[in-house]
Amino acid sequence: MKSILSSISAVFVALVACTCCVGPLMAFAGMLGASVSQLVWLATIKPLIK
């Protein structure tokens, strides 16, 4: 019983520890995606070299 409880608590602690890193990474990815979507107007520019 004690080993099962310690295993469950270890998994829980690992998940909580990951949230401090995953959350900011997801926010950064969202901001990056939103800023790249503002560059759609660049697709209308034609290249000079054919």
Image (spheres, rainbow, N blue to C red):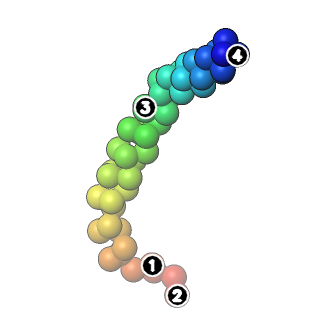
Q: Position of residue 17 (x, y in %)?
A: 54, 21
Q: Amino acid at mark 2?
A: Lys
Of the numbered discs 4 and 1, the one sitting upstream in the chain is 4
Contact flag, marks 2 and 1 (Cβ < 8 Å):
yes
Tag on residue 3? 4
Q: Say if mark 2 contacts mark 3, CB within 8 Å.
A: no
Give amino acid for label 3: Pro
Residue extending furthest toward the top: 2
Q: Residue at x 38, y 52 (%)?
A: 33
Real-space CA distance between mark 3 and mark 1, rounded to the nearest whole angstrom = 37 Å
Residue 39 screen position, x and y as percent: 33, 61
- Give amino acid for label 4: Ser
Q: Quadrant of the N terminus?
A: top right
Give coordinates of residue 24: x percent, y percent. Answer: 43, 31
Mark 4 closeness class: few <14, some 14–19, many ≥20 residues within 10 Å: few
Query: Of tags 4 and 2, which is closer to the observer?
Result: 4
The numbered disc on residue 47 is 1
Q: On residue 10, which mark appears?
A: none
Under tag 4, what secondary structure? helix
The residue that disc 2 covers is: 50
Q: Secondary structure at mark 3?
A: helix
Secondary structure beneath dot 2 equals: loop
Q: Is residue 41 above or below residue 4?
A: below
As shown in the figure, which amino acid type bears the numbered disc 1?
Answer: Pro
Tell me how far mark 3 sits from mark 4, CA to CA.
Answer: 33 Å
